[in-house]
Amino acid sequence: MNNIKNEADRHPSPAPLQMALAIAFALIAISCGGGGESDAPPPPPPPPPPTDSRAPQPALSAPAAGATVSGSLTVSATASDDVGVIGVQFKLDGVNLGVEDTSSPYDVTWDSTTASNGAHSLTAVARDAAGNTGTSAVRSVTVDNSDAISPTVSFTSPTSGATVTGAVTVAATATDNVGVVGVQFSLDGNALGAEDLTAPYSYAWATTGTSNGSHQLTATARDAAARTATATLSVTVSNVAGTALTINGNQRFQTIDGFGISANSASWDNGELRPAIDKLIDENGSTIWRVVLEMADWEAANDDADPNNFNWTYYNTIYSSPRFEELWATIAYLNQKGVTNLLMLNFMGRGPTWLGGADLASSMEDEWVETVASVVYYARNNRHLQFGLFAPNNEMDWDGIEGIRMNAAQNARVMRKLAARLDANGLSDIRFIGPDTASVSQGVNDYFPALMAEPAVMAKLDHFALHDYGGATGGADGAIRGSAYPGRNFWMTELSLIEHAFSSISQGAAAVLVWDGYDSVYNHAILAGRGSSPPNDAGNGPALLSYSTSTHLYTPRKPFYEFAQLFKFIPAGSVRVAATESNANVTMFAFHHAATGRVTLVGRNAGSSNVTFSGSLASLSVASPFEFYRTTSSVNMERGTDVPVTGGAFSFVAPGNSVFTLTSTGP
């Protein structure tokens, strides 16, 4: 047995290299799925990262191109990039302005006083993470620090903490290294009048228009570079209560149709009248226009023997004559200005001899109807003019010079015939107004009843009309309300003074028209011996506009502004409501316009002393404050300090010898 080798001797151990190879081949087999070789290719390598080659896009947003800058200001820009903006560097004339701004919004503060006065260029350079840069368009600005110092301002009156009453002068001094442009005073943040542009800087403050208690006054000085400085102080208003004034929206009277003037068409004069019309509409507020043609004798001979036939061969010649061309031009311009339905065509003066001259012959009534109807037909159909109202005669109860005389019965009769003639000729939309008598008592007691007895006339009559130069209306309102036509109203179509307008309104007039709108020459006045120089028929007060025969210009007189205090602020459709106060020198009215909510107070203080009112609103609400306007011997339609309304209470001063207006829109 010693000669037999053991098992290890018969199977010797493999060499180390062989064992390593065996292990390697085993691992390869495992990785290839358990045995054998695999045909699958190795996975592709990952893609390289994207390349950022697009530059960001900046754009300057401030200051504006071409701006003039001064002092310290902000330069700002926007910037975008497909990956992301890292920062924006602003440059001034190519040199860095501050440090790069690395977060949006991108801006830098520039002290322009470090740059010379004159032109400079700004740019913005945006940078992204890849180092790409983009530059904005160049923006040019002008540096002007010649006035780089703000003004100074301080109050001189009143003193801080003062208690004030009545009229107070608010005053301040202001200085600047170059010059002060103006000082604006304010009360509790609301402007006290307009900016005062000349030293000494002051404002007359009527404290009675301000509620009692503590208030803040501010003075803001401004220089030419628009730099400002502000001074403030507190005062206490302490006024004794004034005359009680109550405005009661539940107590209602007449509805206002409008206000206006009489206009002589003979003054057209190739358009010389245009500026006068513009002033009366735009500045005075006239909305009703009574356009006058006179004399009423244009049909010098009968057109033919048939009053039912318009002889257009004859009439066309008359209605293209200079006198009528001036009428057509006046109406056409008023139409351009928007005056249509409240434009009244009115004939004045005596008629031709064959019709009876000063008195209409009863046998010629149909011929008169034809004469006046032909004008309306021609104006509408040949000249295509718009007017809603027709007053074919004037003061028929008077002297036969102002108009063709007709008694009440004859006037009613010819108006019935005229109504039928207009309707037959397609003019049924024309509305009558009349009788325009010189005597209010005759008009109300004689002419009104005669017209009311003619249903055909009343179907076309919108407004009764009267003339008076003393403030009387003859009880017209009561007569109409007690008639079969209580829905009609009356207008005072001739008066001259503001106090007579107020008187007429107090008696129920729905409109008042001033005689006259402007200085002119009337032929009927020449016939009456009043001369031929303008004005030759001024009523008992001057026309609203004076006329210069040398310059051919129209200029407002004081009544122009007095009537504007009423005309401009009372729109058609306003209802007069109760205004109750006890001062004998003051006449005051209140109006409410439901469509807009506007509440307006208009008054006249005939006394020489100011009157303080403590007002209250009942059943009405307004937006505070009231705007306050006044016309006195020294100012025309001047806007004063607004009048605050607190809980329906307000206070204001009516200056002596003034016409004044308070007006406010609704809530």
Image (tube, rainbow, N blue to C red):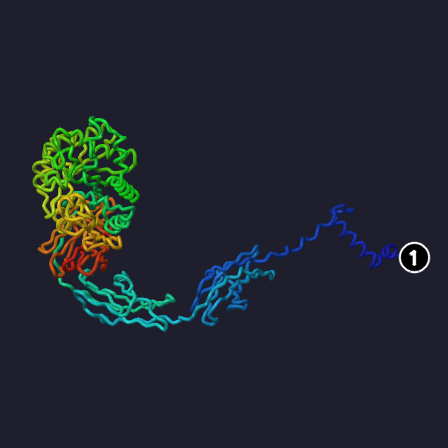
Q: For residue 113, what is the image quadrant?
A: bottom left
Is 201 left or right of 656, judged from the image as shown?
right
Q: Residue at x 11, y 42 (%)?
A: 438
Q: Amino acid at mark 1?
A: Asn
Count up the numbered dots: 1
Q: Is residue 666 above or below residue 394?
A: below
Q: Nearer the viewer, residue 17 or 314?
A: 314
Q: Nearer the viewer, residue 547 or 662?
A: 547
Q: Residue at x 21, y 34 (%)?
A: 299
Residue 111 in view of the camera: no
Q: Nearer the viewer, residue 213 or 203?
A: 203
Q: Is residue 96 above or below residue 534?
A: below
**Residue 422 on image: x %, y %:** 22, 30
Residue 133 in view of the camera: yes
**Residue 187 on image: x %, y %:** 25, 63
**Residue occupying the far right of the picture:** 3
**Residue 179 on image: x %, y %:** 35, 70
Q: For residue 662, what is the image quadrant?
A: bottom left
Q: Does dot 1 land on a helix, a strand or a loop?
A: loop
Q: Quadrant of the N terminus?
A: bottom right
**Residue 643 on image: x %, y %:** 21, 57
Is 12 left or right of 169, judged from the image as shown?
right
* Mark 1 crowd level (few <14, some 14–19, many ≥20, 10 Å Cα): few
Q: For residue 421, what is the image quadrant?
A: top left
Q: Residue at x 64, y 56 (%)?
A: 51
Q: Which residue is mark 1?
A: 3
Q: Nearer the viewer, residue 64 or 357?
A: 357
